[in-house]
Image (cartoon, rainbow, N blue to C red):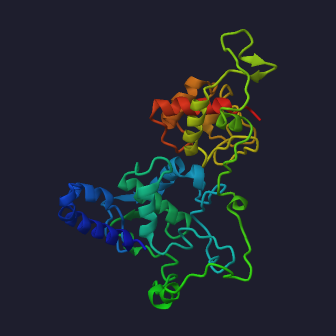
Amino acid sequence: MSKFPSTLCATLTGLALAFPALADPYGLGRAAAPDEIAAWDLDVAPDGTGLPEGQGSVADGEVLFSDNCAACHGEFAEGIGNWPKLAGGDGTLANQDPVKTVGSFWPYLSTAWDYVHRSMPFGNAQSLSADEVYAITAYILYSNFLVEDDFVLSRANFTEVEMPNADGFFPDDRAETEYARWRGEPCMTACKDSVKITMKATVLDVTPDETATGAEATAATPDAATPDVDPTQEGATEDSGTQQTALDPALVAAGEKVFGKCRACHQVGEDAKNRVGPQLNGIVGRPVAAVDGFNYSAAMADAGGVWDADHLAQFLKNPKATIKGTKMAFAGLKKEDDLRAVITYLESVSDQ
């Protein structure tokens, strides 16, 4: 599994070196520089090839996991909501609904290290040092009862860790056993007696519902009939307790796209619920940590203040620097245009 990227990189390297000869007549391309190839060649093989020097303890990993991973995966790697469990599932692989975790399913420790290194934490990938990745991986192993609490993972002892499902996979023999069946004429009609949908992603609650409702529908359809409001006139900003301030439809639409980065943890709209993060209906102007039923971190609960546009912009630009100790792992929005757009979009989503 993990060997494939190395093979791919080697193939791409060979193509890159040969490419100028093919491209010269067209004046396109150049040979990839060694540092460019190295930037892509990050994978780690099951035998430890590709691992950098470094080490990390279970104790250090527990702190790092809490700061960077627990918001989605739980303090004990048990998973929160739809975010995957990283621990548990021992003995479930033969079940109809197996629990596939690092401890129960993954055959190679290199896959876990590699994934954390290249893809995590969510929204801030490749921000962890090699030592931090070793420590987090050690804590995940500890959460699966595969190592003791005083364990220190390093490049030197990496291949000594035995994964429970190391022998649970078999060679890919489809070239010999199945490919011949795929070479004939494809069936285009009446291929099965009946077709039955057994499960939908929306039932599993892993696919965001993009159907616009309420304020979202209004924002997404600028041509909808809306009253012309002059914000300079008396009463323009308030009418029977509802917001009447005119918002730029184009900016609202742009903000909705930016909010796509937030949907994994936050919901808005008529049926919005608390997930990894609280629902954000009516957040602009709302006191910090004020959503009923959501378990805020101590840092957020004690922060105080109100989510006005300025405070939101500061927090969304750099969450961890604005409220130290927040469990929000997202690195922040760096573009001022994105900040302005998403706050305008959140202003358009009234408290349901």
**Residue at the location (66% across, 48% down)?**
210
**Residue at the location (54% across, 50% down)?**
66
**Image position, residue 289 (x, y; %):** 67, 34
- Residue 342 versus residue 330 in the image, above or below: above
* Residue 128 relative to residue 18: left or right: right
**Image position, residue 58 (x, y; %):** 47, 59
Q: Nearer the viewer, residue 49 or 202?
A: 202
**Residue at the location (72% across, 76% down)?**
195
Toward which corner of the image does residue 114 lie, by quadrant? Answer: bottom left
**Outermost residue to the right:** 240
- Residue 143 versus residue 127 in the image, above or below: below
Q: Nearer the viewer, residue 255 or 56?
A: 255
**Image position, residue 349 (x, y; %):** 69, 33
Q: Nearer the viewer, residue 126 or 62?
A: 126
**Image position, residue 121 (x, y; %):** 48, 51
* Residue 75 visible within the image: no
